[in-house]
Amino acid sequence: PLFLQVRDPGLWLWDARRMVSLRYSVEGKSLGESPAPVVRMPLEWVGDSVDLWTPARAGDPETPSIQRSAVGGGPARTLIPATDSGLQQVAAAWLGQRLDLLPYALGPDRIYVGDAYTFRIYSYDGAGKPLAVFGRTLPPHRRGPREAAEYRKGLTQAMKATVGPDGKAFRQPGISARLDTLDREVTTHFFRSPLHVDDSGRLWIVGKQNDSTTIDVFEDTTFLGRTVLPCFLNRRGKPASLRGKWLLLECTLPETSDRPTELQLYRVKEIQTP
């Protein structure tokens, strides 16, 4: 996959397959490439460096952790260590599942890490020192009707027998029992690329509720409010982006549509209070 960063006065792409960084002018002219041996999960670009997520690995006391590494190579430094209680809580909430995409954002001298199951945000200063824990007290989240129907359809298809290496029919175990409990499963409050910081330093959390998209905004640790948008945010990758006064969402359309997704662009307006 390619990771794109807009840099003045051009573009910088990281090619995860070839492990190189690619530079382009704003006109699209290639300015060359350089080695970028990054082997962990990229989170955010910081100047000429990138913050990296190392998920928990069995028997490795140095994980999970967040490092900062120069894109051109060189040793990485630990930004938030495995001993941090916030990282430990976030990893524990996934009940043994591998957390590859950590909810993460950078603000002015701030780092934010999100626990998608409990709607808790752990904030740090720019050097990785813990500052605060905040969020919202909400009921456990469950899938909306459309998300549940699509998930059930995928599990039902997975129940069909496939031919194993020995030529015999093989079925995935445990799927039937999973279908029986699907409606009671607790899921995450927010999905992929959920944390964003606007030009005023406020934290935006892009989440989901009943097949719609939720936007929760915090100023420091104070909750400012929630907006619900008519968007089924169920895409892989990074389906949400906040830049300047604009919010862009890639929304999944019904199967009957002539295309899989649509882009919804929202202008952010400041409300003047007396």
Image: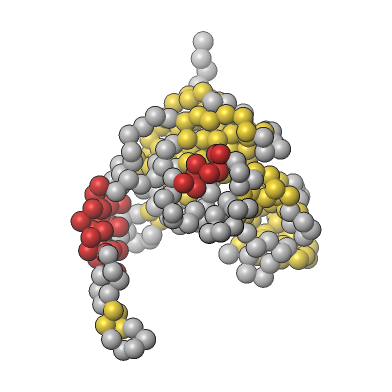
Farthest residue in the bottom direction? 167
Q: Is residue 4 left or right of residue 237?
A: right
Query: Which residue: 73% across, 50% down?
Result: 77
Q: State how the image is colored.
A: secondary structure
Query: Which residue: 26% across, 82% down?
Result: 169
Residue 188 position, x and y percent, is 39, 45
Q: Is residue 68 left or right of residue 265?
A: right
Residue 47 position, x and y percent, is 74, 46
- From this view, report whether residue 135 is shown above or below residue 250: above
**Picture quadrant of residue 220:** top right
Query: Which residue: 55% across, 35% down?
Result: 122
Residue 159 position, x and y percent, is 25, 70
Residue 263 position, x and y percent, is 45, 50
- From this view, report whether residue 165 is shown above or below residue 202: below
Query: Foreground: 260 or 55?
Result: 55
Inspect this view and state whether residue 195 appears. Answer: no
Q: Number of marks in the image? A: 0
**Picture quadrant of residue 131:** top right
Inspect this view and state whether residue 261 appears. Answer: yes
Farthest residue in the top direction? 274
Query: Foreground: 203 or 51?
Result: 51
Query: Foreground: 203 or 184?
Result: 184
Query: Which residue: 38% across, 60% down?
Result: 259
Image quadrant holding the N terminus, namely bottom right
- From this view, report whether residue 175 is shown above or below residue 100: below
